Amino acid sequence: MHKQTRYLGLFCLIALFIVGCGAPTPPAATPTPTRTPAPRQTATPVPTATATPVPPTPTATATSTPVAPVVTPFPPDVNPLTGEKMESAAVLERIPIAIKVSNSPEVRPQSGLNSADLVFEHFAEGGITRFTAVFYGKEPKQVGSVRSGRLIDLEIPAMYHALFGYSGSSAGVKERIRNSDLFPTYIAAPDFGVGQPYFYRVPQEGKAFEHTLFTNPTVLRQLADERGINARPEFPRLMTFSETPLEGGTPVSYFEVNYLKGACTAEWTYDAASGRWKRATAGVVQTDYLTGETLTAANVVIVYANHIETDILEDTWGGGHQSIQIQIWGTGPVLVFRDGVMINGYWERLERNHMLTFWVSEGHPIPLKPGNTWFQLVPLGTTSEQIKEGQLRFTPTGVVPFGR
């Protein structure tokens, strides 16, 4: 491989089209834009001056009328969220559970994240991040600490047909949830009357009261049973999995997403011995409280999407912060990290009940490695730079201020 191809540079241009939604299919929820400006016509992360341009990877041009590929169902004992074969197909005869988990420094290490099939990390506000974790194949005994939902949580439960557990939300977000077609069947939160035994307090010395709420997939599935929704979902779109990555990826041994330096910098280091990415946050190895083991992922996917501040006030500290709408519908750029390589392409979600899928070009998917996946959601204006050979830094920028 020519030396210059080892460096990150200009991504291929990918036109963004915000696609209208079809008729809602529970648990889908219709996107609810708030004073949303027109999306940028390109989604090109601008490299800093130190980054060396490289030729783009296979052309990832999205059209407004893409041809939907034929969905080939997985065998009944293969988890469609991880591509892994389960001990029994019966394990998958249930609803996925999405749970909102804090990423405040004082709550680390969190409980249960290594058992999640999927974890989404996203901006909350004020530069801090929060997680939405999706559990299907495994059931940890405890997940948390559980915190309040955000606008992104009108999207993630709809994509994975999941019951969503969280601890409340701002008045504006609560109203959006109440008016969505997720409500009330697929919503579980104390401010909608769902308390013990589905949510419970685990006091811990030195931790504030708001950081002591926990739940787990087992008790939330009991609620799903009561509501008659605890069944295997029928996903209309599926991700692709393969033990072998696509050829032509860029070797990468380390990368970071610098959401908030010193507090919420997501750091991923490839461990060749295990074939997995190891997680640290702001220079500290991040572990699962239940096991003490380092958080790891088979895949880490950077998803570029339009980020818009809304008129919803989330808090008043530091002058106040507006809720951010992350527009993960339509299509946009994506970087897939697996097996020590980075693959450049685009993500797609054409309907509200579609999960994210990943492509290098129409009809040519990017296969994920079988196993769990972490998604790092970043704005379209996110910049990239080379730290040194094989090491990259992404700095999220481009949240569109409210009223513009």
Image (cartoon, rainbow, N blue to C red):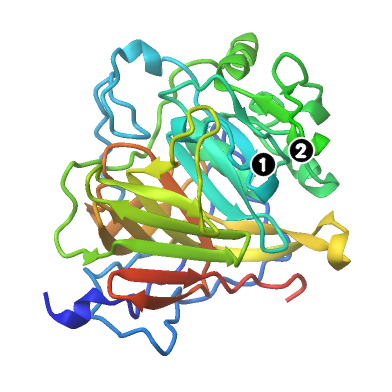
**Element assignment for label 1:** helix
Q: Reading the chain from its start, which is encountered first: label 1 or label 2?
A: 1
Residue at point 52%, 43% (across, down):
352
Q: Amino acid at mark 1?
A: Val
The residue beneath circle 1 is 107
Q: Which mark is residue 207?
A: 2
Location of residue 127 with respect to 140 vertically, above or below = below
Image quarter of residue 58? bottom left
Q: Amino acid at mark 2?
A: Lys
Nearer to the camera, 172 or 209: 209
Q: Quadrant of the C terminus?
A: bottom right
Nearer to the camera, 163 or 185: 163
Nearer to the camera, 203 or 163: 203
Answer with left or right where residue 321 lies relative to residue 76: right
Q: Quadrant of the N terminus?
A: bottom left
Answer with left or right where residue 355 lies relative to residue 345: right
In the image, residue 286 lies at what x, y percent? 51, 46
Is the C-beta separation of discs 1 and 2 under 8 Å? yes
Location of residue 240 with respect to 137 vertically, above or below = below
Tell me the crowding category of disc 1: few under 14, some 14 to 19, or many 20 or more residues within 10 angstroms, Cα based: some
Q: Is residue 152 visible?
A: yes
Q: How far is mark 1 from mark 2, CA to CA?
A: 7 Å
Location of residue 318 with respect to 330 vertically, above or below = below
